[in-house]
Every structure is written in C-alpha cells, then in structure tokens.
Amino acid sequence: MSLELSIVMPCLNEAETIAICVEKAKAFMQKNNIKGEVVIGDNGSTDGSQEIAEKLGAIVINVEKKGYGNASRGAIEGSKGKYIITADTDDSHDILNLNLFIEKLREGFDLVMGNRFKGVTNKDSMPFLHRYVGNPVLTFVGNLFFKTNIGDFHCGLRGFTREAYNKMELSTTGMEFASEIVVKASMLDLNITEVPTTVFPAGRSREAHLRTFPDGWRHLRFLLLYSPKWLFLIPGILFMLIGIIGTFVTMLNNNNEAARWIPLFAGLFLISFQFVVFYALTKIYATNHGLIPRKKGYNKLFLYFTLERGLLVGLFFTIIGFVLYYLGFKEGIDINQTLKTIVPVTIVMVLGIQLILFSFFFSILGLKDDSN
C-alpha cells in the first residue's frame, strides 16, 4: 500500500520529547485519514531515544555521520511517502496542525515552507538574537541572492514532494541543510510557497544543539558559496569601475599630489579583475560538479568564449602594453609622468597575461568527461 506522507524528524538525545512528537505526528495522520509513517533519523543517541520511538511505531534510521543535515537526509532517504514533512524532535513545532502543508502539496507545490513570524507568537519560543537578528538577516540575504520571497528561511517545519527532493540532490551535513533546501528549490525553479505555523518553546531541559554564531556562519557561508555572483562578480565589477574611474581622473590631473593615487587605483582594478575571473571559474566548476543546476545557456558559453579568442584578446593587450612601455620610457624619466604612464601600461600588460592564463584554465574546466 503506497504512503502519502512521511513525517521525518532528525534526533540526537531527545528522550524527553521524542515520544510526544511521534504521538502528535501519528495523531495528525489518523485524524485526517492520511496514510503515512513517522521516520526518525537518529544521529547516535545514547539516552534511549531510539527505543522510545520504536515502541510508539516510528521507523528509526540509524545515521552514523554526525550533523543535522546527515540525520535529516538519512531519514528522508529511508522514508517512502509521496510527500515529506520535516520537523524537529524537541516538541517546538506544531505537528498536530499540518493541514496547510498537505493542502499546498496536494495543490501541486514542490516546497511548502513554514513561517513562524506569521503564526502565533509564543514567549521564549525563539531566542532574541535568532528572532530579531540572525533569522531576519539571513532571510534577507537568501532572498536577495536567490530571488526568493520567503519570510522565514530557516523554519525547520517544511514539506516537499519526493520528486522535488530527488531533483534537489541535497548534500550539506549540518544546520545549513535548512538553507540548501530553499536555495536548490529556487535554482531549479520549483514551485515554492509558505504557510503560517506556530512555534513553541522547546520541551527539553538541556541546551539546544543549535549554536548561534557558528551555525549562523555556516548558513551565511553556504549562501555566499552558492551565489558566486554576489561573492565575486558584483564586488569585482564595482571595484573595477572605481579603479578605472580613479585611474583616469588622476591621469588627467596635473597635480603631483594626485599621482600618488594611481598605483592604488591600478592595484584595485587588477584585484577586481581577479574577482570577476574567480566568478567565472567558480560558476563553471560548480556547474560541472553538480553543485548548482546546469542552465539552458550554459553550453553556449563555451561557443562564444573559446580558447583561441581568449588568447587573441590576451595577446593583443600584452603587445599594446609593451608598445606603450617603449613609448613611455622613450620620453625620458620623470616621476610624475612615469606614474601616469607606466602604471596604467603595467595594468594593460598584466591584464593581457591574466587573460591568456584564464583562457587556458577556462577551457580546461569546460572539457567534458568522456566517461559520462
């Protein structure tokens, strides 16, 4: 008999609350006549959490590799439902009221996010820094980077179809797993929506596994690494414009004091060019290794930018640089004139050589694996 729903919960030493979580999940499905299962991804509990869950009829998947993401993926991959809803085992999620999640999944949405800020607010349900600083900031960054419109990027209560899960090919091991689901769904253009949900204070007496600053950084680092455009391209273009404009302004200024700024702007331009190069290389590497989805126009990139074209452009810049070097020294040595002539000329030469090297590496990254 096929199952419609799998309620999946990662667990690490949650003996105090796992029973109530399993009972709530089963009660919800029974009340709403849903054929389903409760699957626990146990991450090495030593307090008897596994036995408690099994006695209540839950399926327990033992996941050896530590981490919230590992435990979640282990449980999901061991489940059988058409739809999957993830929740925590600390009794903080409103598992008895999952109707909105089921309705949206049945309507055809691929990912249904819970929004704790639109639900009933309970005192002490979220630490102050999480509610007013960490979550809003990371949610803003996530929406900006990946063009989503999610109000709560990190709510652990969320639902998705098995088909969507298989498409996302999730791989993160820790708390950033919550961000990866939204990011991958967005990059794959899956149908995403959100519904209000209530969050309660955790029912356990021990401290939470979540570490505010280390786990917050893991989320931010993940968002940056999966968005090379914001990490490399946009800062690169911005600083490149500053470098170009600054160099030309100082070159046109006859004031000797202005000449001291030329090396600074020249260096800024070259550094910013490296940012743009790293964007291109990172994008290609991530696409070829399945870290980000391959877009339709990806293969055309290698038709427009070929090794031969890159070498010609790089060689052109290098030759122009040598010629301008010769003309600059031919005019005689004047410190002010040297700065205004030689430094920009050096930029042109170095840029040409960098383009040649980049073209070779770009082409190497674009090589197809004959074994596939």
Image (cartoon, grey):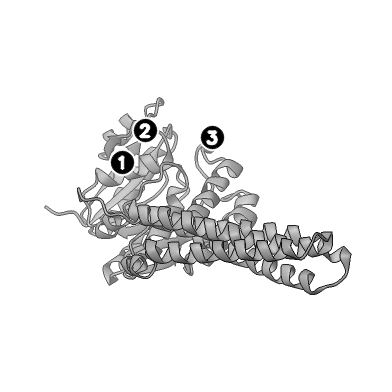
Whether tag 2 and tag 1 are in contact, CB under 8 A, the answer is yes
Residue 153, which numbered label?
none
Q: Which residue is mark 3?
A: 205
Amino acid type at circle 1 is: Gly
Amino acid type at circle 3 is: Ser
Residue 74, which numbered label?
1
Q: Nearer the viewer, residue 26 or 126?
A: 126
Residue at 36% across, 46% down = 171
- Pointer 2 local density, CA inside 10 Å: few below 14, some 14–19, many at least 20: few
Regarding mark 1 in the picture, which secondary structure is present there? helix
| Residue 227 as seen in the image, left or right of residue 136 | left
- Measure how far apart labels 2 and 1 are at the Cα level: 9 Å
Regarding mark 3 in the picture, which secondary structure is present there? loop
- Measure how far apart labels 3 and 2 are at the Cα level: 25 Å
Residue 65, which numbered label?
2
Q: State which tag comes first along the sequence, 3 or 2.
A: 2
Q: Nearer the viewer, residue 88 or 330?
A: 330
Q: Is residue 170 visible?
A: yes
| Residue 27 as seen in the image, left or right of residue 273 | left
Which circle, 3 or 1, is nearer the viewer? 1
- Pointer 3 local density, CA inside 10 Å: few below 14, some 14–19, many at least 20: few
Q: Nearer the viewer, residue 308 or 250?
A: 308
Q: Nearer the viewer, residue 81 or 343?
A: 343
- Position in image of residue 33 (x %, y %): 23, 59
Give the tally of numbered discs: 3
Q: State which tag comes first along the sequence, 2 or 1.
A: 2
**Quadrant assignment, res 21:** top left
Residue at 33% across, 31% down = 50
